[in-house]
Image: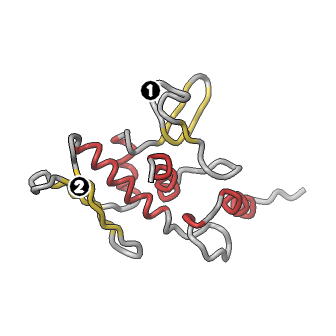
């Protein structure tokens, strides 16, 4: 799974709001900003804000806390790694080898865990019976329209 797919699935679990037409606005490195990339959360007045826990310690920390992820770095192991777990209805248990950057590996482990949870989030549509990871953009947009507040005229 590439970084974009990981971020989009993790954004669903974290609760980053999708655009009205469904899906997320994603910017590749250097596409609209020389200093950031990821899921665009705000754009205006020459400023762009991104949600990207692959690059941002702050976003990764907020994601781990919100999703109740248990982070266990192990630098003393013969293969240094970070383990991420979540117990309860949805079990996540994965490892990410540290390589040259243990901080980047820990952020990636958090995003991988969030992405796996994003696939398991129940659909917001009434009586849909699927999970968010199974929806197309059209289905998600239909659910968004169906759950929008109605204005009486």
The residue lying furthest to the right in this view is: 153
Q: What is the crowding at mark 1: few (fewer than 14 residues within 10 Å), some, or many (at least 20)?
A: few
Locate the C terminus by quadrant.
Answer: bottom right
Q: What is the crowding at mark 2: few (fewer than 14 residues within 10 Å), some, or many (at least 20)?
A: many
- Left or right of residue 92, residue 81 in this image: left
- Left or right of residue 10, residue 105 in this image: left
Locate the N terminus by quadrant.
Answer: bottom left
Percent x, y of residue 128: 66, 74
- Examine the rendered structure and indicate whether residue 147 appears above or below residue 47: below
**Residue drawn 66% across the image and 52% down it:** 22
**Residue drawn 71% across the image and 50% down it:** 21
**Residue drawn 49% across the image and 46% down it:** 4
- Res. 152 image quadrant: bottom right
**Tag shown at residue 89:** none
How many numbered marks does the figure carry?
Answer: 2
Disc 2 to disc 1: CB gap under 8 Å: no
- Find the distance from the CA under tag 2 to the CA under tag 1: 27 Å
- Examine the rendered structure and indicate whether residue 46 appears above or below residue 25: above
Q: Which residue corresponds to mark 2?
A: 82
SS class, disc 2: strand
SS class, disc 1: loop
The residue lying furthest to the front in this view is: 1
- Examine the rendered structure and indicate whether residue 131 appears above or below residue 3: below
Percent x, y of residue 147: 71, 63
- Res. 112 image quadrant: bottom left
Q: Which residue corresponds to mark 1?
A: 35
Percent x, y of residue 116: 43, 63
Going from N to C along the chain, the mark reached first, 2 or 1, is 1
For the residue pair 131 and 2, the one nearer the viewer reads as 2
Percent x, y of residue 61: 34, 48
- Examine the rendered structure and indicate whether residue 10 appears above or below residue 4: below
**Residue drawn 28% across the image and 47% down it:** 105
């Amino acid at each position: 799974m590439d970084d974009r797919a990981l971020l989009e699935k993790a954004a669903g679990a974290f609760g980053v709001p999708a655009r009205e037409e469904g899906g997320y606005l994603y910017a590749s490195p250097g596409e609209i900003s020389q200093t950031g990339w990821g899921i665009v959360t705000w754009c205006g007045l020459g400023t762009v804000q991104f949600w990207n826990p692959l690059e941002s310690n702050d976003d990764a920390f907020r994601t781990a806390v919100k999703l109740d992820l248990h982070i266990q770095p192990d630098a003393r192991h013969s293969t240094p790694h970070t383990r991420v777990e979540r117990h309860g209805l949805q079990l996540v248990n994965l490892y990410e080898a540290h390589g040259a950057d243990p901080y980047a590996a820990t952020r990636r482990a958090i995003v991988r865990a969030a992405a796996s949870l994003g696939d398991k989030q129940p659909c917001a549509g009434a009586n849909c019976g699927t999970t968010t990871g199974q929806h197309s953009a059209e289905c998600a947009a239909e659910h968004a329209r169906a759950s929008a507040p109605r204005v009486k005229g």
